[in-house]
Amino acid sequence: MFALAVAVGFVVIGVLGFLPGVTTHLGELMFAGHHSKAKLFGLFQVSILHNLLHLVFGLVGLGLARQVGGARLFLAGGGAVYLVIWMYGFGVDRASYANFWPFNDADNWLHLFLGFGMLVFGLLLSPRAGNGGRLDTPFDRP
């Protein structure tokens, strides 16, 4: 259920990144890169690519959250991915074209906490789940 909530959160954040009022300077939203001036909640720098990646990540999570092994993969694997994204955002020159995501300090802190939180919850999920020891039971069926 936690993986489902995280996945829904990513879908919602991806959609909110396109809504005026929730995203400031929406008229300056760029496809990608550090030139995008749009900020989700006035804090997190976003681009069209950034929003689409959140949507896709959330939709993948919705599919994986149907089984315990998939939920564990989504949380632990996604957490690891977000830690890599945090390291990239921390090390990239913010004014360069390598900052294609785009990243700012608020994004980097969020990626760190998301990555660490997802990884921990994914690893704490049933240690026998998804390793072939038993069949996973989807959450929507007994």
Image (cartoon, helix red, strand yellow):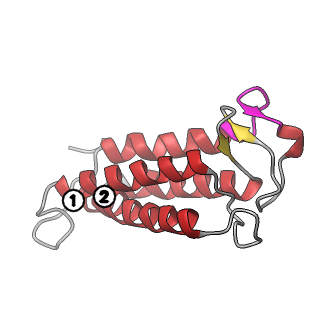
The C terminus, quarter of image: top left
Tell me what residue is drawn at x 39 percent, y 56 percent.
Answer: 115
Q: Main secondary structure of the magenta part?
A: loop
Q: Which mark is residue 123?
A: 1
106 shown above or below 73: above
Residue 91 place in picture, x, y as percent: 56, 69
State the image quarter where residue 74 is shown. Answer: bottom left
Q: Which of these two is toward me, 132 or 101?
A: 101
Residue 78 place in picture, x, y as percent: 41, 61
The N terminus, quarter of image: top left
Q: Which mark is residue 74?
A: none
State the image quarter where residue 96 is shown. Answer: bottom right
Q: Which residues are magenta?
A: 16-25
Q: Which mark is residue 119?
A: 2
2 shown above or below 75: above
Tell me what residue is drawn at x 75 percent, y 52 percent.
Answer: 47
